[in-house]
Structures are given as C-alpha cells and as structure tokens.
Amino acid sequence: MKKKKDPAEQFLELSARLTGFERVELQGTGLSEEYYRQLVGVIGKELCDELCLLSSRLIEEFHDDEDELNAALRRQIMASAKFGPVARNIIQMWYLGSWIQMPPGWRSQFGTAPNDVTRVISAEGYIQSLVYNVMGAHPPAAKQPGFGSWGQPPDSDPL
Amino acid sequence: MFTAKPGAIRKRHQLLREGAPSIPKEARIKTVKALRQHLQTAIELEHSTIPPYLCALYSIEEGSNQEAAQVIKSVVMEEMLHMILASNVLNAIGGKPSINHPRFIPEYPTYLPHSDKAFIVNLEKFSPKTVETFLKIESPAAPDAPPEPDNYQTIGQFYEAIEQALIELSQKDNIFTGDPRRQVTPEYYYGGGGGIIAITENKHPRVALEKSLAALREIVGQGEGVHHTIFDGDHRLFGEEVEYAHYFRFNEIKERRYYTNQDTPLTGPTGKPFPVDYKKVYNMQPNPKMKDYPRGSEVRQKTLKFNRIYMSLLDALHTALNGRPDTLLSGVVKMYDLKYEAVELMKIPVGKDGATAGPSFEYVAVKGR
Amino acid sequence: MTEKKYDVVIVGAGIAGAIVAKTIANAGYRVLILEAGLQAGIDLNGNETYLNYQSYLERFYLANAKVPNSPYPNLKNAPSPNVLDTAQITGTTPDTNGYFVQNGPLPFASDYTRTPGGTTLHWLGTTLRMLPNDFKLKTEYGQGIDWPISYDELRPYYEMAEREIGVSGEVKEQKYPGTGKNYWGEDYVLPMHKIPQSYIDKKFSEGVDDMKISIGSREFKMRITSTPQGRNSTPNHRYKLSPPVWDPYQQRLVLEKSAEGAYEPVGSTWDPYTGQRCEGNASCVPICPVQAKYNALKTLRSARESNLEIITQAVASSLEIDSASGRINGITYKRYQNPDSPEHTVETARGTIYVIAAHSVETAKLLIASGASKTSDQLGRNLMDHAVFLTWGLMPEKVYPFRGPGSTSNSPVFRDGEFRRDFAAFIMPIDNWGWNWPTNAPTSNLSQAVNQLNMFGKQLRDHIAGSVPRQLLLHFECEQLPVPGNRVTIDPQYVDQLGNYRPVINYDITDYTRASFEVATSITNQIFARVGIENFSQYDPASPDYLVYNGAGYSFSGAGHLVGTHRMGFDRYDSVVNRDQRTWDHENLFLVGCGNMPTIGTSNPTLTMSALAFWAAENILKDLK
C-alpha cells in the first residue's frame, strides 16, 4: 500500500532535485524540517503545498528518466513566474544557510511577508551551508578540518 | 571589583596503586613474546572503548550538554593517548603494533577484550544507561578478586601484569631493543589527554624501563586501574583545579553533581549541580550495522562512507605507529572528518519511533591497501 | 571610593597595553588598565570566558556580512569603525555615516576593535619583522623619514615579541632582500615550526619560482617563501627561550635560555588544551574559534594577577596636564554600567607613569582632545596603512581555496631595493580564501550560478565544484609614505553618545603608492600568462576606494594596519615621542602602539609594535626604580 507523502517529505524530495544532493545528505544537515517551516513562513502554506504537490507529481511521472525530469522541472518550476524565484531561494537556503529576499517583481505580484528579508536563518544553517561541501572546503569558523589539512587536496572518498 | 584572574592550568591527578603487586604467579607473563602479545591486547583494549565513547559524544546535540560532552571528549582523548603510549612501549621492546587488521575492531555489542565478560558494551547514544556502562568500564579493581590468567577482572589488573613483566624480564636481559625512530614523540600529539612519553629516545635500558613504567602509570592512573581501596579511604582527590580519573568524571554525570575539594570517593560528589539533559540527544539506533539497510540505499552508502573514513584513520594510525610518527597528524585530520560524518548519520531517520542512523564502526575492505 | 595610586596607568587592553602591563606587573609594580570595552570580554575564569567567546562566534555566524568587526559588540559608548560604512566621498561635506567622519578625498577603509583583547581578536596573525632599510628609508632611498632606532637595536625586542605572541616559522626560509647576515641571531629559531603552507602555495610556487619579472628596465626573480605567523604549530624543540623578565641589576629586560626547554603552545583562554594547533578554521579574520591564533587576552591571562587591575567599561576622555611641568596628573574616564545607556560616572585614575595604548587613531584623538603634545604639530598626522591592491584569476587546475589560515606564503621580492626611489615597496602574500575579499565568493558564485546562469541540481553542483576550487587571489600590500595631510583630527560637531570625540579623517594615496598598483598589475599579467591563470581582476569605479593612475582605474582596500599618528623621531619638533617611546612634551607619559612607527615598511605592523612595547616597558621600568 502506498502512503501519501506529506508536504515536508515532498519538500525534501524537491530540495534534493534542486540542489543536486541526495536526500540523506540533506537529512544529514538536520535542517530539512526547519527549512520547510521557513519557506511556509514566507510564502505561505497554500503556495508551498502547491509547489510541493507539483514537484511530487513531476518526480513520480519522470522518476525513471533523469533528463526528462530535469526538463520538466525546468519548464514547470524554474521557468514559472510564480515558482521559479521560490525554487531559486530554496537552493540558496540549502547552499548558503540564508534566506534571500524575494525579487521585487515576485513580491509585488505574490505578496510580502515580514520575514522576507535577507538574513542568516540560524547559526546551524550557516554551519551546514552546502556550498562549502561542494568546494571541498567548510564554512569559515565551522567544521574545521584539523592541523595541516590545507597543505593537501581535500580527502575524497578513500575508495 | 573588576579584577583579572589568570586562570590556572588544571593539575592532572593520577590515581596510583598502593601496596605491592597483586598478580598471582599463575597469571604472570613469562616471555618477551607474551609481553608483546599483552601490549598488542592493551592497544586493542584501549581502542575498544573509543567507538562507544564517540557514539555517546557525537549523539549529544550541538550546543547542549556541554559539560558532559567535555567529560567524554577528555576521556576519549586520553584513551587515544593510551593507545599511543602502549604502542610506544610495544615498539620499545621490539614489537610491531597492528592496528588495521580485520579483528582489531570489536563487533558491537561486545565484551571488552580479555575481560571476565561481566558486562556488554554497546554503540549507543548518550543516556543514563550508557553512563552506567562507562562507569563499569572505568570501574576500579577489587583487591580481593585475584585475576585468572588472561581473564582479567579489570583493566587495572591486566596492566599490573604487564608492569610486573617489564620489571622481571628486564632484570634478566635488555628487552628494549626497538628502533627509537618508531617512537611517537610529543610534537606529534596535542589537544589534551596528557603527555606522550617516548620510551627509547635515550638508549639506556634502565631509563627505558622507568619510562615504560611511567607510561603505564599514565594509562592506569587516568583510567580505572587502581585498587578498590581508593573507594574506602578518605582520599581527597577532587576540586576544580584537578583532572581526576575517568570513573569519577563519569560519576559526576551520573550523580549530576560536581565533586568539591572536600569530597572523597565515599562521600561522592556534593558540589554544585552538574547539568545533564538526556533529551538533547540524537535518537541513534543502538549498534547500527550496514546490513540493517537495503543494499544500494543512500543511508547504507553513507554508513559505508563513514566506515571508510574510519578505516583510513586506522591505516594512518598503523603507519604512524610503525615507523612514520609524522603520519599521526594526518590521522588527526581524519578524526575531524569522522565526527562530521557520524553527526550527519545521527540526523537521518531510519527506524520507527524516529530512531536515526549512526556510525557503525565496522571493518570494511579498502582498495589499494 | 578612595583614590588608589598605581605605579603605571595604561589606557587600552589590546596587545600593546597588555605587553606593557604584563611586563611591568611581573616586575613587581602595580598596574591599572582602563578598558573601554565590556567586562564580559575579560572575565578570565574558564566558563565565562568560554561562554562570552561563544557569543562572539554566534554573532559571527548570524552576520549577513562577515566583516572583521562582525563578531564583536559595537558599543555606542565606545564605537568602533566598521568597513561596511566605507563609501565614496562626494561633494564638499564629509561622510558622517559611520563612526569616522571622513573628509576624504579617499575614504579611510581600515578598522579596529574596542573590546578587551583589542584588534588582535581579528588580526590575521602575520608576524613579519621589518627590514633594516625600512628604518632608514630617507638615507637609503630619499623617501619618507628615518627612524631614531635601527633594526639591530630592535632585534632583541623582536625576539621578545616572538616569544610572547608565539610565532611559528622557519628562520632558514626567511630570506628577504636587503638583509645582512645578522638579520636573525646566530642559531636563532622561532618557538614553533612553520604553519604548513597551503596546497595553493605549492601549486602556485611550482608555476612561478625563479621566473623573471620585468618592470621597466629592472629585472626581478620571483620567489615564494613561508610566512611567519602568530598561530600555534608544532613546537620547535630547538627553541629554548623563556619569557622576558626584568633584571633590576642590569636595568634591562632579559630573554634567557630556559633549563626546561620545550616551548609549549599556548591554548585558548578557557581551556589550555583547545587551540594547541591551528585547526584550519579558515576564519582568522574575524575570529579564531579555538584561539590557536594569538590574541592579547592570552598575555593578560599570564600577567601576575595580584599586581594588575583592569577597569572595564571605562572610556578615557582626557589627560589632566600640569600646566607648569607638563606632567600628567591623572586620566579622566567615563565609566558606564549599562552598554545600552549613555549614563555614566566621571572618574580619575592616578599613577606615577601613564601609558596610552588605545590604537593609533584613538590615542591620537585622546591626546588632541587633552591639548597634549602640541609642540611638533605632528600629533594625528602621517596616518598610514598598507594600500591593499588585489588581483585574481582562475588557476588551470583545482587548488582548493577556502581552507587554512588566510595566508601562509608570500613573495618578499619587492619588499626592498633601489626601486624604492621610484615606487612603493610591497609584499605579495598569496591568499588562501579564494576571491572572498574582492567578490564575496563563494556566495557570489552561487548566486550567479542560480540567478544568472539558471542552474539547478547536479549541473549546479558540478559547476561550483569545477570552478570555485580554482580561485586564486594575490595581494599587493603597498607601502604608504608619511604625509602630513593624512591625519586624524577632532571637531566639536562630531561626538559619540558619551560626549567623546569621533575621529575626523583626511586621507589620500600619493602617486608613489599608486605607481605600485601599476607595477602589481604588470607582475600579475606576467605571472598569469606564464602559469595559464585566467584573469578575472576588475575594478568597479563605484567601489569606495577607486582611483585613477596613468589613465587606468584601480580599487584598493585598507589592510587594518593603522600607523604613524603619533610618531617617534629625533627631536621635539619632528615627532610626538622620542626613541624611548616617551612623549617629548610630557615627562611621565609614554605612548605605545603602531602610531609610534615613523614609517610602515612592508611588514604587518603588529610584531614591530609589540617589540616596541617591550622596548617602552623597559624604559618605564628604568623610570620606576
């Protein structure tokens, strides 16, 4: 029997598609639920549900073809006036640990929220910024790699 | 008034055994070969407590339980130091520490190697039960319980046998024939846990014996290995300026109180409250195994990644303890990686009731070795 | 409260004040420090210290712009300048937006920190000695002025400073132009081995070592060397010196070989085992989370407790000067209890000798406000900084920046030579933090990839992974000459909420230094062409410190090296202090800090200033006997 996924779970699936990270990698930050709450807090539950449902539908429909799925995500989400800026903010939230204020055009069309301001979401959000993982580095002042580590290229998977 | 107070560096308090050795004849170590085996066992023994301590430590949520985390961290640092000290002694008597063989890592849950199998050690999150186990691991020896051969009741008795063998065997012959270049010297080790003692920097066998005994005292004095009598006396061992033995540090967590400098082992800790919050802990499933997860699943891959880092850490240690002490620095770098990976696993829900994955500390084959 | 009299009263608990305080307190005299910053910054017992430092770290994590002062409380009662307030100055009115009142023509773009421990909390930690010719620039090259102290005289004090700070470095690798055989003492080693050089350094050196650089008719051979740093590394077991102590019989500070030998790295102020090695947090500026990098709190912590009192939240506002003798009778300070409220009491501290160690700008300001040291008309003038010119590009392969201390190697080739007749000397550090300084990488890279390049998913991940690890950044830290018009003044119009003056600053860069930007651009082009580095350097005409030289536009930044505002010299008419670091006009007033330095050379000034602080402490001790 197939259980219907809740929006937070759908948000995680969408985040994995948008960021290029696996679900467990995102879960490993411990921030998935917090970021879902942040998103709801700015764009509202209704819009958020709509986005999550749409992405969930696309992921199910194209789950066996990566290229098709990405094309669909690009057409229906990234290129959408409504969802595109939201999706780009989800990416930036995961990569930078910051909420970036939505673009003026989006704000005038879809509304403003008091917490739609550029800000670091939390100390933990900063510490878990994914951009540094991708670079083989770590956020300044967090997750330090130990004495002398900078003298060598970063450890890749030992295998 | 606003007056600057330069902080004192905490003095290390060592618990030293009182009285004569208690090892009965039949339990004695009689050959250098047997002594080397015992020291290899010592290395494995010191290592075997590290994964359980690390699990508890990493399960503590960032920013919470800072006092308890500090205690566990300091104990882990000392266990690592003990591994190196035992290796230095083994290298000094011409042995070769073996760190990265498949049986080096216990399969948890496990009894401690070469113990009397009185209790089981798990890989578990920080909890009252875990603290109880830690207290058992670090429990002082009962003086009236003579050890059977190779079946030591406490780690203390085991080390006592090694000490005695070092003394007796070196009376007959110079046993310190190891290459001094295999010794790990202080510049390669930092971050607490005490001082490295290099055994054979000076080639005189008498100096080497003294240093070996000092190294063993460092191990035993910080750990559990003293007579139970320490509990019965009115020893004043505590206070803010003193780092005391592991048992008492864990006892502060259990009793949720600090010792004061008036306290004795009999009074227990009576000082200010020691804050503990067992709720601010990741809900790690005990004794995780890669085989718990479907083949090819992301979480299995991530656990495997953890184990590979762990393997590369053991490899670095093995190299460091076999003639390349400078490799210890790259080993320390892997310790940091290990932590970040472990903490990520502990945030990934896997079971019912919100239990999470965790570091499994399993042997995995690594290519190119 | 009865008025207590101290042997020495010091203003400022940064590195200069801390060194003087420790040296004098440990010699047996009673010392008072007045510190403008918060009490929380100096609670020296373990737990409070830890929690306060964690609050700095938390503030840093949550800051949108992670600038040097971002971790530290900005106090309305003792404000600090913030580089975020630096903007182009247009029209005829000064820019009063930040703490500085900026008259221009160029805005002064460096900051400092008014908190216990001072600016060492966010210094990078580079500890280069100055070069012998830096002390006689006028004699050798006809530029600037000479110092009344020679390198050879200062050398033993450099050794004291290296002991106090705990310098890591390899003496045998420190070969600079214009240094004779005796630059380092015989067999001298630094307390710790060098901080490992970065992977970037290695890859870059492979590309440029021994290449010829042509500048006009001159030719230079490029060379990269490790940089000495005030951060913890592997102890050098050949280092045997114990901390400097006052010898009352010889009337001097002595640095002797210790019987115990081994130097032990000094860990954090809350736990001696934390920070025994640099752990590669890659955040030295603005905060080292483990305090493996030296800060002045470590010096304060090791001062003799019974002889040192520190009054915090006490902002010195004027010196009481005896009109007949010129001697200082006391220091008036405003003491606040609540950092959010301007409410305060006015109190006076009294001692035999007074030392102002409040950082170049604040020290000059305090003296000007008190009508002190007027004879030479040099007080507040000759403000200097290193003009930092940056060039950047993409290396042909990944070099993995954003790891390790800010910089671990440099090229010393242009630190000294005949060319100093024509253009400013500079040091060329290789940066380890990618394009963060000029472009706010990696945030800007991510933002560009998502918002302009329209990337998402694996494509985005691969793009960042493939490009950002190739980032290379070079610095050119160019010498500025002392210019009387570059100055700090005060104006009754501009005061802070306690009624203390805000610094008013006039600042410009002369052609002597501008010419070095042109040279640096040429060096960059030659290096990039040889190594195959894709040049991305560009200078926005809208950036705060933008200037034009020979028809080309350049931006530069401040280095945080504020020097020269109360310089030492040969007589009371050319300078504020004499070679003893004593003010010419006030017998019992000493100044310490980078403001005493007549010229800046090409070294980050903290080490030289620390050496001078020991030098000053010795002269004070001679007075106290």
Image (cartoon, coloured by chain):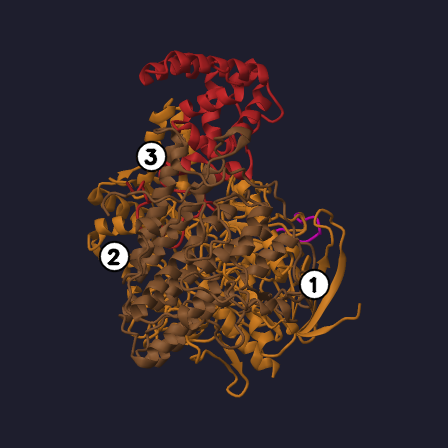
Chain colours: A red, B brown, C orange
Name which quarter of the figure residue B212 lies in.
bottom left
Q: Amino acid at mark 1?
A: Phe
Q: Which residue is mark 3?
A: C465
Q: CA distance from mark 3 to mark 1?
A: 51 Å
For the residues labelled 2 and 3, the Cα–Cα distance comes to 30 Å
Q: Residue furthest right?
A: C1
Question: Given the image, what chain letter belongs to the residue carrying mark 2?
Answer: C
Q: Position of residue C435 (x, y in %)?
A: 38, 41
Return the chain for callout 1.
B
Relative to the observer, which residue lies in front, A45 or C592? A45
> Is C287 positioned to the left or the right of C39 in the image?
left
* Residue picked out by circle 2: C223
C124 vs B168, nearest the viewer: B168
Viewer-proximal residue among C324 and B337: B337
Q: Is residue B330 magenta?
A: no
Nearer the camera: disc 3 or disc 1 = 3
Mark 2 element type: loop
How far across and how far down the image is residue B274, in percent?
A: 65, 53
Q: Secondary structure at mark 1?
A: loop
The mark found on residue A152 in the picture is none
Write down the region rendered in magenta: C494-503
Q: Disc 3 sits on a residue from what chain?
A: C
> Image check: C222 left or right of C566?
left
Count neighbours of disc 3 (C-alpha within 10 A) and say few if under 14, some if 14 to 19, many if 20 or more.
some
For the residues beneath circles 2 and 3, the answer to whether they share a chain is yes
Q: Nearer the viewer, mark 1 or mark 2?
A: 1
Q: Are marks 1 and 2 on the same chain?
A: no
**Figure check: C30 above or below C532:** below
Magenta region's main secondary structure? loop
Q: Which residue is mark 1?
A: B2
> CA–CA distance between discs 1 and 2?
50 Å
For the residue marked with disc 2, what is the amino acid? Arg
